[in-house]
Amino acid sequence: MIKMRLAFPFIALALATPVFADEAVDKLVVAIEEAGCVVTMQNGDAVYAASGLSEEEIFAAVQKLYEQGLVSLEADGSMSLKSDVCQ
């Protein structure tokens, strides 16, 4: 089930991830923005599918966004995006 694998691992960003193109980050940002700027257990599958990325690319993109301070991880397991669209 992608929901559990998608929402919880956002918190576990210490996973080793490969170097990847910024295009993956851009795709994930668009998918999260279209989902209302927050990834939850309820919309995790939709965000995953909308991004068109592999699970490995998702983890790497989230890690990069986190390192740049563009996402915040919430106690309820959700992740909020900070972008021009998501204030």
Image: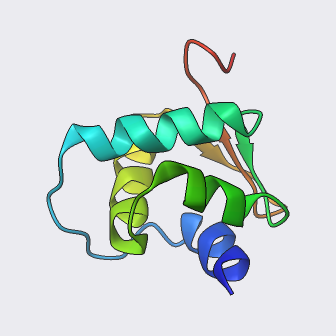
Residue at far bottom of view: 1
Relative side of 20 to 15, left or right: left
Q: Nearer the viewer, residue 16 or 33?
A: 33
Position of 42 with respect to 86 (left or right) is right
Query: Residue 76: percent from the left, percent from the top?
Result: 84, 61
What residue is rendered at 23% in x and 39% in y? 22
Instruction: Classify residue 66 as left or right of residue 67.
Output: right
Give coordinates of residue 15: x percent, y percent: 36, 76
Q: Is residue 38 above or below residue 85?
A: below
Residue 24 spot, x, y in % from top left:
32, 46
Q: How is the image coloured?
A: rainbow
Q: Residue 57 lies in what quarter of the image?
A: bottom left
**Residue nearer the viewer, 38 or 77:** 38
Q: Quadrant of residue 43?
A: bottom right
Position above or below: 50 against 11? above
Q: Residue at position x 68%, y 33% from top?
A: 34
Quadrant of the rendering where the N terminus is positioned:
bottom right
Q: Is residue 71 visible?
A: no
Along the viewing direction, whichever of 45 and 61 lies nearer the viewer: 45
Outermost residue toward the top? 84
31 sits left or right of 41 in the view: left
Q: Evaluate whether residue 67 shows in this view.
A: yes
How many numbered circles does the render carry?
0
- Residue under the image location 62 percent in, 43 percent down: 72
Spot occupied by residue 16 in the image (x, y as percentages of width and height): 26, 75
